[in-house]
């Protein structure tokens, strides 16, 4: 039957059926920020530290395992102040200590930064992001935060 042949013909496909192009830049991070983010390995360590028993030596052991490893991190500034504790490395004695939250996580941290960055750090406002390569120093149980030093 000639009518059956007309019904079974496929409909023509044209450009109107193509998927719309997706934006290349994710909505969460502006393309112009250039600050980067915290290394996933560091976020994993922070998670392990957070889950460790407060009164065990587990946190000390985790820090000791990773002591020589440098991690990229971005920290959202809470405050910047002079480094008051004695630091054996002279580069940090007149430097600044940044207190903030790890970008990509919710852990509060302090980072001791060397004095070559003082001018940059003194100009920061709460909420600004700072990027640094950092090494782990210790877990501060009083403030429940990770302490690090610029590598």
Image (cartoon, grey):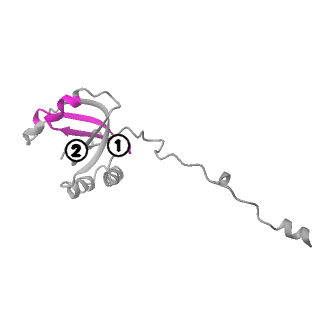
> In which image quadrant can residue 62 be found?
bottom left
Q: In this view, does 113 lie to the left or right of 102?
A: left
> Where residue 111 appears, x then y in whole percent?
23, 40
* Residue reaching furthest to the right: 1
Q: Earlier in the sequence, mark 2 or mark 1?
A: 1
Q: Picture coordinates of residue 150 (x, y %)?
A: 19, 43
Quadrant assignment for the N terminus: bottom right
The Cα atoms of the two marked residues, 2 and 1, are separated by: 12 Å
What is the magenta range?
93-121
Q: Which mark is residue 148?
A: 2
**Residue depicted at 63% across the width and 54% down the height:** 18
Which corner quadrant of the image does residue 83 belong to?
top left
Identity of the residue furthest to the front in this view: 2
Element type at mark 1: loop
The number of numbered discs placed on residues in the rendered structure image is 2
The spot of residue 37 in percent (x, y) is: 34, 45
CA neighbours of label 1 inside 10 A, class few (<14), some (14 to 19), many (20+) = some
């Amino acid at each position: 039957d000639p009518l059956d042949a007309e019904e079974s013909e496929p409909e023509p496909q044209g450009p109107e059926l193509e998927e719309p192009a997706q934006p290349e830049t994710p909505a969460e991070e502006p393309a112009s920020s250039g600050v980067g983010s915290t290394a996933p390995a560091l976020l994993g360590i922070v998670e392990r530290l957070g889950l460790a028993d407060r009164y065990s030596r587990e946190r000390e052991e985790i820090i000791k395992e990773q002591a020589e490893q440098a991690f990229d991190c971005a920290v959202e500034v809470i405050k910047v102040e002079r480094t008051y504790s004695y630091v054996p490395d002279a580069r940090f004695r007149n430097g600044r200590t940044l207190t903030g939250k790890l970008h990509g996580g919710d852990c509060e941290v302090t980072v001791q930064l060397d004095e070559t960055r003082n001018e940059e750090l003194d100009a920061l406002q709460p909420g600004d992001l700072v990027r640094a390569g950092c090494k782990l120093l210790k877990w501060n149980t009083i403030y429940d935060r990770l302490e690090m030093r610029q590598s």
